[in-house]
Amino acid sequence: MTALVEEKKVEIEKGDIMSGRVIVVTSGKGGVGKTTTNANIGTALARAGKKVVMIDTDLGLRNLDLLLGLENRIVYTIVDVVEERCKLKQALVKDKKNPNLCLLAAAQTRDKTAVTEEQLKDICEQLKKDFDFILVDCPAGIEQGFQNAIAGASEAIVVTTPEMSAVRDADRIIGLLEAKEEIKSYKLLVNRVRPNMIKTNDMMSVEDVSEILSTPILGIIPEDAGIITSTNKGEPIVNDEKSLAGQAYANVARRILGEDVPFLNLEEDTSVMGKVKKFFSGLLGKEK
Amino acid sequence: MKDIFTDLYNKVLGFFRQTEKNQEEESTKDVACNRLKFVLMQDRTNLTPELMDRMRKELVELLSKYVEMDKEALELGFEQEGNQMALMLSIPVLRAKDEAEIEATLAKEDEEKAKLEENKEAEPDEASDDTAEVITDADNSIADETDETDTDETEEEISAVSDADETVSKSDAVVTKPVSKTASKTETEDKKVKAVK
């Protein structure tokens, strides 16, 4: 009951009529963590009690199913939906561990032309009625696949890393998002941040990236070996509350829900060597 | 013996000071930031180095009518200031021209213009002012394509310099830009040009 009231409130605030939020996760460059981000934010939102559906639009190169551990349960894909071999609801794979979470998988055997912008927009519109959040996983690149993915979205998360090529590609994406009227807001998620390298000025800081792209930050995710092991298991890292990257993703989800959550302090060098070095440099600094 | 200890001490110190040393030189982070800023300006404005060079030449041509400047030391580039992109032009002024000189140049130009008009009456207003117009027009067209919420106006701030009568040495002009009487700065503020793409 209270949930219903809350939802109503959000709708009134946003001025939307009876609809969920469609957020596209995009990056331009491949391999910066779009799909990981999608899986984790979606899982975190679902854990927070929201009804979430993720759409994998990376036709031919689907991976979101793997990250969620749902690869063996896919019967129908998004292409089956648009070619009317099944109903939209039939194609949604429900996560058994988290009943709030659904996946609409991409077809692995087809290419990006199998679904059009209009069709994707239509799917998003239909899903809006039943879900609080529709997260669209966008393929790499700025071609048709990208245009399809952003077609139904009104918000965007631009994933980047503090590397030159990723930032440059993100800038292109931001330019394209800005030109798209339907996209009302976009924010930056800086992934694979290495605080120690930033400290020694060997990596651009998150502030540098945000300033260069003149785009606000939604989240900062540290580089974490746990991402690989969690992918191995098919379980998003956000389920592991001890993991720093997991906490960071959980915080991103809370910010999406409107909470004002401070960024995690990643600066502290907690390794033994770091502490020793700090101690000695402090000592020697005083002597001089 | 003493030397060995000093040496050792310095080495140990050097090890722990590594990070501080890096700050003195340009860190790889700064290199990355600068290279990135440069390349993004090109991406966003669609201005290749060749076009920038042409713009520079045209500006030199235009401004030389009014001031005698160090053509080689003229700096032209884009800078990001928060949400806005600015076209920064820094011109070391060698000597201010006196009124007579300027008037002479302009009169000569008007003459040429008049001649040109006589030749082709169909196309008026062809000559020198064009250079400036081409540039501002380009800026505006870029701005027009972007968000309507932002101002499309092109602000120009030309802070001409006092005491310009004095002739000042070239090197002086370049180094002491902000303080000296010789520097003149033309700032063409433009709005974000991102959406051009």
Image (spheres, helix red, strand yellow):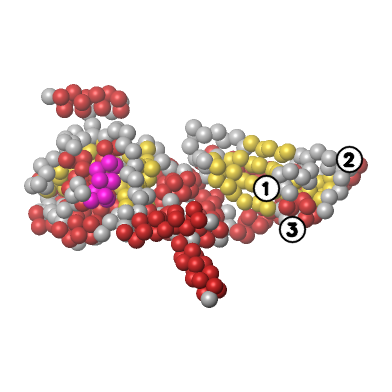
User: Which callout, 1 or 2, points at the residue further toward the start of the chain?
Assistant: 1
Q: Is residue A159 above or below residue A277?
A: above
User: Which callout, 2 or 3, points at the residue further toward the start of the chain?
Assistant: 3
Disc 3, disc 1: CB below 8 Å? no
Task: Answer whether residue A66 is magenta in the image.
Answer: no
Query: Label 2: which residue?
Result: B99
Query: Label 3: which residue?
Result: B72
User: Can I make out residue B180 in this image?
Assistant: yes
Name the residue at 76% across, 39% down.
Answer: B160
Q: Mark 1 — on which chain does it sit? A: B
Q: Which mark is residue B89?
A: 1
Q: Residue furthest bottom?
A: B1
Secondary structure beneath dot 2 equals helix
Name the residue at 16% across, 27% down.
Answer: A3
Q: Is residue A49 left or right of residue A188?
A: left
Q: Position of residue B89 (x, y in %)?
A: 67, 47
